Amino acid sequence: MTKSIVILIMTFLTMTISAQELNTFFSTLSKNNMFNGSVVVSQPGEKIFSNNYGFSNREKKEKFNDQSQFPIASITKTFTSTAILQLKQKGKLTIDDPVQKYLPDFPYPNISVKQLLNNTSGLADYYNLFDSVIKEQPEKIISNQDIIPTFIRFKTPLAFVPGSKWEYNNVNFCIAAMIIEKVSGMSYANYLEKNIFGPAKMNSSLVPVDRKIKQKNQVELYTYPNLYSTDLVNINTLKEPFLIFAKSNFYGNGGIVSTASDLQKYQNTLFTYQILGKKELEEALTPTTLNDGKKVSYTIEGKEVSYGLGWAMYSDESNGKIVFHDGSITGLTSVLVHNVTKNKTVILLSNTGNSPVFSTSNAVFQLLDHKAYTMPVQSLSRIYGSLIENGNKEKANQLIQAYLKNTAGYESTERDFNRLGYQFLRLQKCENSVQTFNAASLIFPKSWNVFDSYGEALLQCGKKEEAMKMYRKSLELNPENTNAKEVIKKMEALSKK
C-alpha cells in the first residue's frame, strides 16, 4: 500500500469519526432544546458534515431540509463589506474617502466609508430615529433611502467623534449599501446576485424586495416571550419591542435569506479569493485601530474580540485566527465562524431566538481538533424563573441548592439573573423579583452588583430594612459603589425625620 493511499484512508476515517461525533453532539443539543435548525461544518474547504434538527414549522410539524431558507440577519454585513471591497479592488471607490463623495446629501463630512464598515462612524442607530416620522405617516415603510433625509430634518447629532470609539450600528451598513448602489449603478440585491451569489453558486440566496414576504422554503421563527418562559412561541404572536421593526424594510445591515449550504459556498469562494482579492480580504480581517491608537476590543461570552471591516475576530489566536459574524433578530440566531489558519468552518442557522451559537461553535472546533469540549446546557435563570412564576418555590429553591453542589448541569451568569430579576420587577411581580435576586446572591456571593440590584428590588417592594442590609453588603464588597452610598444616605436621612 502506498503512502498516499494510507494518508487518504486516514483522512477518510478522521472525517467519518468527526461526522459521527458531530451528529451525536447536535442530536444531544436538539434533544435538550439547545439547537433547532441547520448546521454545516467544513475542513479544509470541503463540507464534512451537514444536517438539520427539529422543525421549520412547529405548528405543522414540518421538519427542516437542505433547502430550508433562513433570514441570516447580521451575517449580511459580511456581504456588504465584501461588495464595498470588490468595488475598491476594481478601482471604483476608495474606502478612506468621505461618504459625502458618493452620497453628497450625507450631512456628516468627516465620516469615511471605512468607518461605516468598522462601526466607528458615530452615527445614531435607527431604533428611535424614525418615531416621529412613523407617527406622522403610520402607513409608511421606512427604508435605507429615508435615513439621510431624517438625519438632515432632525439635525441628528453624532454619538461620538468618528474614529474615536467603536459602537455596533446597523445604520452604518445601510449607508454602505446605498454607496454600493450609487457606485455600481445597480440595486443592492442585483449587485449581490451578480457579484457574490452567482459566482459562488448560491442558488437559494437572495435579498427579498420585502423581507416581510416569506420565500417558499423560508422557515418560521420562534422565541421565548420573556426571560422566564420555557415554551417557544411563533414571533407572529408577539409585539415587536421597537416601533421601527414593524415599520421598516432596511437592507445591507441584514435582510439576506439563505441556507446553511449556500453560506458554506460563500465562505469557500471568499476565503479562496475567488470573489475578493487576498489583499482586500486581509484588510477586512484586520482589527480596527481607533484615533488614539488603541485596538477595538470588546468581549463575547468572556472572550476578547476585535472588529475589522464587517468581520469580527477573536483576539486569542493560539488555536488559529478565527473570524466570524453572528446574526440575531427576534426568533432567529445565526453564526458563520471560520478558522483562517486551519481552514475550518462552522455555520449554524437556528429559527429559535437566543440559541447558544457561540458556545456551540467553540465546542465544535474543539471536537474537530479531538480536544475536550463543553456541551452547551440550559439556562439556570430561565428554568428557575419558570418555576417561581408557576408557584413552585420549593422546587426552585431545590434547583439552586442542587446547582451550588454541582454547577455542570446548567449555564448560570450574573447578567442573566440580573435581567430576570429586573424583568419581574418591571412587571410588578415583586416577590418573584426578590426571590430571583436572593438566588443570585447565593450563586454570586462576591458580586457587589447583585446585592445592589437585590437592594433596589427590596426597596421598590417596600422592604426598606432588608434593602438597607443589601446596599450595605454591596458597599462592603465595593466601597466605590456610589449608588449604594447615595441610597443609604437618603434612607438614613428619612429615618431620622
Image (cartoon, rainbow, N blue to C red):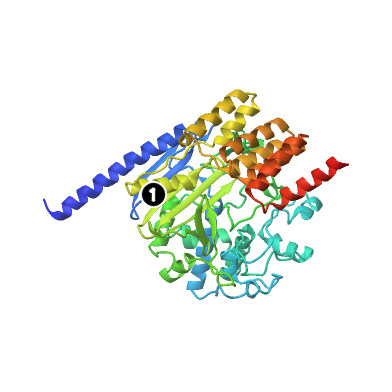
The number of callouts visible is: 1
In the figure, residue 76 lies in which quadrant?
bottom right
- Please identify the residue farthest to the front as the structure is shown: 496
User: Which residue corresponds to mark 1?
Assistant: 365
Which residue shows up at 59% across the image and 70% down it?
113
Q: Is residue 374 above or below residue 296?
A: above
Q: Which quadrant holds residue 451?
A: top right
x, y percentage for residue 490?
81, 46
Residue 477 in picture, x, y percent from top left? 63, 47
The answer to whether residue 347 is left or right of residue 182 is: left
Q: Nearer the viewer, residue 218 or 356?
A: 356
Q: Find residue 169 and report its horizontal and vertical position in percent.
A: 62, 59
Q: Quadrant of residue 450?
A: top right
Q: Residue at x 20, y 52 (%)?
A: 7
Q: Amino acid at mark 1?
A: Phe
- Residue at (78, 63) in percent of width and height: 154
Query: Which residue extends farthest right?
Result: 497
Q: Residues within 10 Å of mark 1 (few under 14, many from 20)?
A: many
Q: Measuring from the top left, give residue 260's x and y in whole percent.
A: 45, 47
Taking the image as shown, residue 109 lies to the left or right of residue 17, namely right
Q: Residue at x 52, y 54 (%)?
A: 75
Tell me: 126 left or right of 387: right
* Residue 260 seen in the figure: no
